[in-house]
Image (cartoon, grey):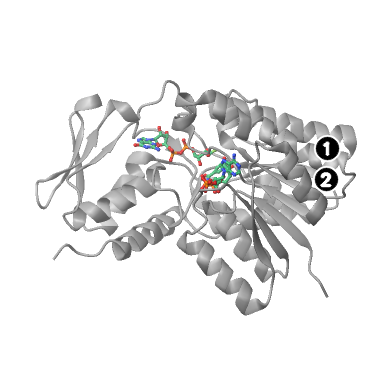
Amino acid sequence: MVGKTALITGVTGQDGSYLADLLLEKGYQVHGLVRSGSRASSAWLEETKATSAKLGRVFQLHTGDIGDWQGLDRLFRELRPDEVYNLAAQSQVGETFKSPIASVEVDGTGVLRLLECIRLNKLETRFYQASSAELFGKVRESPQNETTPFHPCSPYAVAKLYAFWIVKHYREGYGMHAGNGILFNHESPRRGENFVTRKITLSLARIRTGLQETLRLGNIDARRDWGHAADFVEMMWLMLQQPTGDDYVTATGESHTVREFIEAASAFAGFEIVWEGKGLEEVGRDRKSGKVVIEIDPQFYRPSEAAFLLGDPAKAKARLGWEPKVKFVDLVRMMMEADLARISPKT
Ligand code: NAP
Ligand code: G4F
């Protein structure tokens, strides 16, 4: 029996790689959209290619860009996918303050191009949109659930807000099976190196082995609800297996500060951080060696910031039976151990 056909945009990213692995295991033919000159040779994509060969499943990459409507249209007509997972984005919130116009073309209107490919070609394709907890921004209540009002506070979040509503409109207006996963932060050893968790674990591993002096960060008192990417892609798949499309918060229900992440990761890396000073003068010093490990750097502050994100995943649990398996401390340990193993000792 030939499995369903899925198209993943953003397949070279963290979530794309976990989702491709999951869908291949489930018997899908998996197609991935890859920008020319992207990270398509990343180690985990090579692993995915090996998995697909072992399982005898299709895993095919197609060059394209969600800014290019004609190219997308050709691909949709060729593949006629059963399911599309739109994970493509400029997903670094800080970067979208620097290039807001380019970001909206991908994170906002890029989504509309994909929806139009489905509508104009009269396809029965089910559509998943990677939406974001950043929509809640300057939060009006905690924890945040599907009825919490949005107050986006970055170009990224405003673009994702457009995407959220256009997906909802295509569901309500055209009866499309389309839904938004309102994703809270999720991480893994495959996380991009500029996101704060991975920056912390990679830097601590480099400091441990003498390859880096200090770790410089911005707002370390921001709170995030951090889960594991492998748990979150399971929820993406579950959403498209339901009789109708809907929007779901995907979160752990537990929130920690960046400072707490640093402390936990440092402990796994063999440091014991004590904090000294305030504001930009604050430092984190290793109690045993007396060495300054953490410094504050204003270049990593943003013009505005979602200060406190905490998701309520009750709807996902009640309707889809979804529950994240990996807890905060296990996530930190997993990421720290992976980076310590990657960075070989200097001597
Ligand atoms: P990621 O690692 O940054 O991956 C983003 C992917 O999008 C990459 O494969 C990138 O390709 C691709 N991409 C960027 N611009 C594109 C374009 N114009 N055309 C086609 N592909 C393009 O992000 P992630 O963590 O896997 O997140 C996946 C999705 O979930 C994103 O939409 C993100 O906004 C959303 N999200 C993530 C989180 C989280 O905590 N991870 C939380 C909420 C929402 P290149 O290899 O070419 O750069
Ligand atoms: O790791 P971050 O860059 O992730 P952020 O901004 O929360 O966005 C991530 O999660 C969103 C969902 O909530 C996604 F939609 C989005 O695509 C992305 O995956 O920053 C986390 C926190 C922020 O408060 C930031 O200000 O860490 C703070 N931070 C402090 N110093 C830093 C740094 N962030 C980064 N990237 N780099 C720093 O040096």
Label 1 element class? helix
In the image, is 131 to the left or to the right of 27?
left
Up the image or down, 85 lies above or below 1; here it is above
Front residue of this view, candidates 188 and 106: 106
Which percent across, then down, holds residue 62?
65, 54
Q: Position of residue 182 (x, y in %)?
A: 64, 40
What percent of the width, then of the height, locates residue 320? 73, 54
How many labels were placed on the picture?
Answer: 2
Q: Are marks 1 and 2 in contact (CB under 8 Å)?
A: yes
Q: Position of residue 57 (x, y in %)?
A: 69, 72
Q: Which three-letter amino acid code belongs to the residue tagged 2?
A: His
Spatial separation of the CA atoms under disc 1 and disc 2: 6 Å
Badge 1 amino acid: Arg
Which quarter is ligand 1 in?
top right
Quadrant of residue 115 in the image? top right
In the image, 128 versus 82, the foreground residue is 82
For label 2, being within 8 Å of ligand 1 is answered no
Q: Which mark is residue 323?
A: none
Q: Quadrant of the N terminus?
A: bottom right
The answer to which quarter of the image holds residue 111 is top right
Residue for badge 2: 177
Residue tagged 1: 171
